[in-house]
Amino acid sequence: MVKDSHCWVCGCQRLRLVKPSNIHGALTSSSFSITDSHYGMTGAIYQCESCAFLQCMDLAEVLPFYEDLVDPTYDAGRPERSIQARKILKIAHKLQPGGRLLDIGAGSGFLVEQAIQLGYRAEGIEPSAWLQKMALQRDLPIHLGTFPHAAASGTFDLITLIDVIEHVSNPVDLLKNIAESLAPGGTAIIVTPDVNSLAARILGRKWWHFRVAHIGYFNKRTLCFALDRAGLQSVFMCRPAWYFTATYVWERTHRYLPKFLHLATPSFLADTVIPVNLCDSWLIACKREKP
Ligand SMILES: [Zn+2]
């Protein structure tokens, strides 16, 4: 039963089912873990007949799962995730070389930590009490909750939304709030998977971004449309790389292979961090449109 059947990007009420749910059993917060590897498992995906946005309406109320989220594997990947954050900040730095930074969906504070080292006055917001506590243990200013947040008031020169927008059922409102919180000339950086990418089309329903936690699937067109509706204008786009240990990539790749091809990770590779770029995400930098 679809309770609120309108497109989260354009508001159109004509939506059609394109992928039935293959979730078995009750959902728990671990179903929403950042390192979840049940690729291809999603709620029922509906497509908007007007703008083609894909969304899981039955999973619109997911915040309680994030509030209870505990994901030790995520923080174990701190070195490689810090490299990834630094690469994103390197791009951001060219557009916004300093000032006040807000990271929305900050996790345990990888990006905020790197941003502080680069000279930004950085803070973040994170709904998971467990992740926020990890950040506080490192003296990183991460506020518990969601954006907008009373403790992160005022305007920001740089707002980052890295792999977050695909987790929410109100993407346009979130982007509008970001637009309103940008200082004059400020920049927002948004990263999200691209459902129209070649990798997504080749892997089909087994694409690694098809997972329970992802309830909205953007492509370049729907993302730019959502930005436009929020009063934001794209000024730069690229395909960001991710950084993983070779062990992680080896294990995750094996999920696509038949069992007889499974091999142990070569020990000489174990701690090597490698960039992975399947060109299946977008990084968009945007500014507030002039009134
Ligand atoms: Zn739509």
Image (tube, helix red, strand yellow):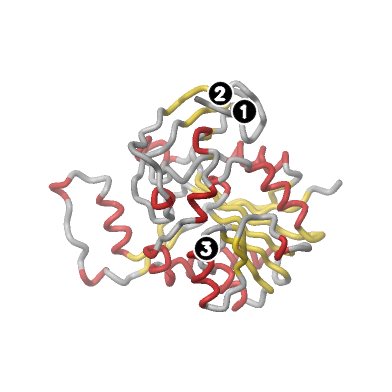
First in residue order: circle 3 vs circle 1: 1
The residue lying at 36 percent from left, 33 percent from top is 22
Q: In the image, residue 108 lies at what x, y percent?
A: 51, 67
Residue underneath mark 1:
6
Report whether 151 appears left or right of 26.
Answer: right
The residue lying at 33 percent from left, 70 percent from top is 272
Residue underneath mark 2:
15
Q: Which mark is residue 129?
A: 3
Q: Name which residue type carries label 2.
A: Leu
CA distance separating discs 1 and 2: 7 Å
Q: Nearer the viewer, residue 207 or 20?
A: 20
Q: In the image, residue 14 lies at what x, y percent?
A: 60, 21
Q: Of helix, strand and loop, which one carries label 3?
A: helix
Which of the 4 image quarters holds residue 220? top right
Q: In the image, residue 127 lies at what x, y percent?
A: 56, 58
| CA neighbours of label 1 inside 10 A, class few (<14), some (14 to 19), many (20+) | some
CA distance separating discs 3 and 2: 35 Å
Front position among marks 3 and 2: 3
